[in-house]
Structure formats: C-alpha cells, structure tokens
C-alpha cells in the first residue's frame, strides 16, 4: 500500500490557491488516493494579494490549470496588459512634454542574421524613433488603445504577447474554486501553535477551530506574517532596502467612467520619492503611490495620490479609501527549510514595479511540483530550490534597480538611487560593459531569470542610456538593409492598427459572452 503523502498549505489568497491548484493539477490529485492537498485558511485574517498585474507567464499557468480565458476575464474584472508606460522617470527639457517610454512584452523584431539593435544605436539620436517603437509594433498598438488579439482567436494565443490586469481578490476566489474542482480540500482555521520535532522540523499545527493538522510538507502562504518559515523556523529575512528604497504603498480603486480610456498597459509615473501606478480594470481604475518612507512622509504620499486622481478627473478624489501597505523589500535565502517551503509574501517581496510578485509564486509552485520527491525525505530539494529562488530574487533586484539607477531626476530619492554604493555589483559591472555594447543573451542564465536581455534593452534605451558604437561603425555595413526592416516594422504596425479591435471593445465583447 502506498504511504499517505499530505501537503498542507497554510494561507489562501492568490499564492495559496494558485499553489494548491498547480500541485493538484501537476500531481493528478484526483487520480492518486495516497496524495492529499489541503488549504488551511484563517477566517480572521484578510489577504494582502500580490498585486493586480502580472507577467505573460500567467497565461501558460492559467491554461495549465484548465481555466477558460474568457471565464477568467469575466470573473476577475480582467483587462489585457501589453507592457508598462513609464512617465517622468527621466526629466524632460524645460517647457517640453513629460518624458515617456514604453516597455512592451513583445520581444524586438527578429531579422535573420541581422541584429537591428546596433543599427538603431548608430542612428542620429535627435531624429531616430524611440527604441521600443523602432523594434516592435506593440508600442504603437498599445498607445492607440488597441488590443493585442482579436475576438475569436484561440484562448491564451495572440499576434502580440500580453498578460493581464485583474482584481486580486476575485482571482483568489477563482483559483480557489478551480483548486477544489481538482480535489484540494479546504479547511478554515486559525493557527494557534506550530510544534517542532527533535530535528527542528514542523511536527504539527494546532488550530483554534479544527484541532491538529499533520503533514509531510507544509507550505507557508501566510503573507508578510510568515508564521511557519519565519516565526516558527526562524529563517532569516534579507532586507535589500540599501538597494531598493521604496518601502510603502498607498492603494485605492476608483470607478472607470464609461467614456474613459481603458489602457492595455500599466502606467508608472515617477514622483519626487517613488512612483505612482495606474491600471485599468473592467469598471475600475487601480491607482497607487509607491514611496520611500526615508524620503517622503505618509501625508505627502496621500497628497500625491489625491492629486494624481484629481488630474485624472476622478470624482470623489478628496475622500479616497486608501489602503496603506508597508513592506520591507527583501527575501529569505532559505525559503525551503526541512519540511516547510515558503511561497509568496512569506518568501519575500521587492516592490510592485514590473509586477514580479505573482511570477515568483508561479515559479515557486512549478518548482515544488517538479522537485517534490515521490517518497523519502521532502527536504531533499531544499538546497537546489533555495539556490534557484535566491538567484531569481537577486536578478529581479538588478532589473528593478536599473530603472532607478538610470534616472537623472534631481530629487534626493533619485540621487541616492544613482549613488554607486546602492547599485548591486553585478549590475554595475554590466552597465560598464553596456557602454560599449548592447545587452545580449549571454549576459543572463535563463533558468533563474524573469527578464531577458531585451527587457534590459527596453529600459536602458528608453531612459536614454548611451552605448557608444561609433568606433566600430565600420563593423555594421548593412544600414540600408536595416532601414528596410525598420520600415517593415512600421508597416506591420499600420496593419495592426487597422485590424486589431479597440481594447475596451474586446473586453466588453468577452464579458457579453460573444
């Protein structure tokens, strides 16, 4: 008889329920009676959520879980996300419009045996188009509020890469329903005690409502409280506030007027000590102010949020229901300790920039599913899991810091961010190399990266970073060919603008069931 294998996930929310559904689907829970996955969710503790935006990987995850895309969009108030528009991260000349650049999800156009990046770099900076506009048609598609796909195209497929904006609480509810369909057991109870055995592993949990729980593997999805991995097992938290200064967020939701623009991108607008996000949901706008408490007071942050909403002509902006979210940017280097592994906020959190919270949950859930031994000690994968997740966090820190380090804004927050002492060593080394060559695929090990080399290119050249190829201009003799490809990309963009539906129109059509 096969021994019982019990997995207890403590905490619900997006992290807990996504992990539960993923494990149930991967392990074929309904077909294996010796496996048991339980979500223990406290009725007394609300969920923080990991944000309202994500990365294109979520499409593959939702498809793997067997969740219909149209159902997902309808039940989570979702819209489509094609990237991030950055506003005011670089100061504009006096009297000019605010500086903007776009970070699209679509990779730069690939021309066989012709790398277009050097040819863009060799063009006249005063007359060349922005990097993302030159390299992909998605920039113009998003700017025109077009959708990345057409009605009737296959679920999770499209001509252009995309992710979603969504209501985090509604997503958690949808994932919970799917997890239960896949055989996950749901129990409500508040943990009152975590008992350890003689080896320092978790022996059992006691709850106020349901008594005792025992499992072979415990997954900590208790959010910032980190009740298992932190409080019980003492896995140390590594703060990175010396590199990423933001440690507070104020968030609110306001109605989306019927005649308002429904963007298919996140808008990230820099302010004196951080940045403001705006995302368009179906029927609402999610707006937030991210800031450093060392550089900005809470009252001033609230003023900035109200002013942003006022500029957006939102009614009721003086009485905004703001939610304050303090956080310590960082992570636990030991996210798998003995028979316990942390997923989501209990493992770490950096900041909302580039929407990496949920993609880290996706990565952790997939790794647990693949690495979990079919028998024997569940701690066997801990070393490798911790190595991979630590590397992933460190690499994301480098990418996020890139945005701040390149800014030439004059305020103390931005000057402190540009100080050499605050820039991770690996990023500083790459920036020196990139002064003479663009980022390339050999700069990154894909298994531990969330962002590819071209993501770095979009940020670098969107913010005006200078890569000097002048001395090697003779190494790039195919300028005429490159110009023809650049023109071809613009023709593709013209065609996409004519053929792709408006973003709002597509979302309305999906919600109407057509």
Image: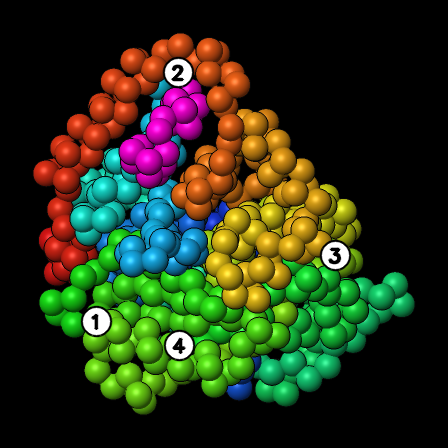
Q: Residue at x 35, y 71 (%)?
A: 287
Residue that numbered label 4 is attached to: 304
Q: Residues within 10 Å of mark 2 (few under 14, many from 20)?
A: some
Q: Is residue 279 above or below residue 124?
A: below
Q: Secondary structure at mark 3?
A: loop
Question: Label 3, label 1: how many angstroms apart (C-alpha)?
Answer: 42 Å
> Where is residue 466 shown, x and y percent of the image?
49, 36
Compare marks 1 and 4 and give the one earlier in the sequence.
1
Left or right placement of residue 340 versus residue 369 in this view: right
- Judge left or right: residue 190 versus residue 62: right
Per the image, label 1 sits on a secondary structure element best described as: loop
Q: CA distance from mark 1 to mark 2?
A: 44 Å
Residue for point 18% across, 61% down = 261
Number of marks in picture: 4
Label 1 environment density (alpha carbons within 10 Å; few <14, some 14–19, many ≥20): some
Q: Position of residue 480 (x, y in %)?
A: 29, 13
- Residue 346 in picture, x, y percent from top left: 63, 66
Mark 4 surroundings: few (<14), some (14-19) or many (≥20) residues within 10 A: some
Kindly identify which residue carries mark 2.
Answer: 114
Question: Counting residues from the N terminus, which is met first, the one under dot 1 or under dot 2?
Answer: 2
Tell me which corner region of the image, top left, top right, bottom left or bottom right, holds residue 108.
Answer: top left
Q: Position of residue 157 (x, y in %)?
A: 28, 39
* Distance Cα–Cα, label 4 vs label 3: 38 Å
- Precedes in sequence: disc 3 or disc 1: 1
Q: What residue sits right under mark 3 in the picture? A: 334
Residue 116 is inside the magenta segment = yes
């Amino acid at each position: 008889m096969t021994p019982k294998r019990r997995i207890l996930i403590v905490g619900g929310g997006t992290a807990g329920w996504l992990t539960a559904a993923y494990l149930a689907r991967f392990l074929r829970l309904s077909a294996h009676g010796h496996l048991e996955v339980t979500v223990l969710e406290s009725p007394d503790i609300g969920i923080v959520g990991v944000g309202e935006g994500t990365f294109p990987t979520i499409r593959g995850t939702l498809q793997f879980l067997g969740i219909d895309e149209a159902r997902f969009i309808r039940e989570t108030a979702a819209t489509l996300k094609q990237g991030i528009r950055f506003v005011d991260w670089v100061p504009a000349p006096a009297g000019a419009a605010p500086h903007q650049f776009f970070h699209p999800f679509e990779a730069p156009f690939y021309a066989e045996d012709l790398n277009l990046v050097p040819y863009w770099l060799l063009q006249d900076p005063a007359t060349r188009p922005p990097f993302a506009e030159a390299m992909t048609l998605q920039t113009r598609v998003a700017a025109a509020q077009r959708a990345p796909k057409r009605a009737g195209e296959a679920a999770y497929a499209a001509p252009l890469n995309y992710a979603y904006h969504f209501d985090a609480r509604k997503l958690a509810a949808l994932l919970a329903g799917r997890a239960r369909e896949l055989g996950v057991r749901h129990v409500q109870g508040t943990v009152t005690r975590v008992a350890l055995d003689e080896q320092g592993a978790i022996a059992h949990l006691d709850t106020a409502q349901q008594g005792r729980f025992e499992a072979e593997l415990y997954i900590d999805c208790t959010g910032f409280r980190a009740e298992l991995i932190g409080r019980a097992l003492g896995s140390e938290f590594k703060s990175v506030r010396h590199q990423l200064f933001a440690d507070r967020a104020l968030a609110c939701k306001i109605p989306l007027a019927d005649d308002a623009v429904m963007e298919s991108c996140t808008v990230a607008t820099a302010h004196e000590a951080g940045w403001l996000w705006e995302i368009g949901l179906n029927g609402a706008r999610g707006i937030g102010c991210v800031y450093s408490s060392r550089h900005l007071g809470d009252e001033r942050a609230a003023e900035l949020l109200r002013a942003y909403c006022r500029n957006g002509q939102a009614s009721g902006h003086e009485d905004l229901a703001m939610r304050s979210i303090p956080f310590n940017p960082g992570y636990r280097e030991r996210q798998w300790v003995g028979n316990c592994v942390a997923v989501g906020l209990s493992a770490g959190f950096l900041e909302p920039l580039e929407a990496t919270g949920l993609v880290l949950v996706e990565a952790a859930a997939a790794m647990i599913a693949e690495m979990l031994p079919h028998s024997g000690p569940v701690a066997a994968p801990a070393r490798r899991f911790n190595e991979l997740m630590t590397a992933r966090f460190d690499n994301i820190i480098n990418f996020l810091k890139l945005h701040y380090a390149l800014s030439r804004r004059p305020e103390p927050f931005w000057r402190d961010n540009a100080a050499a002492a605050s820039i991770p060593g690996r990023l500083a080394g790459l920036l020196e190399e990139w002064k003479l060559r663009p980022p390339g695929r050999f700069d990154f090990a894909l298994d531990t990266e969330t962002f590819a080399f071209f993501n770095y290119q979009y940020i670098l050249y969107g913010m005006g970073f200078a890569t000097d190829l002048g001395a090697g201009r003779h190494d790039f003799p195919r300028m005429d060919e490159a110009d023809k490809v650049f023109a071809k990309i613009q023709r593709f963009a013209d065609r996409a603008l004519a053929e792709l539906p408006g973003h709002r129109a597509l979302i309305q059509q999906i919600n109407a069931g057509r």
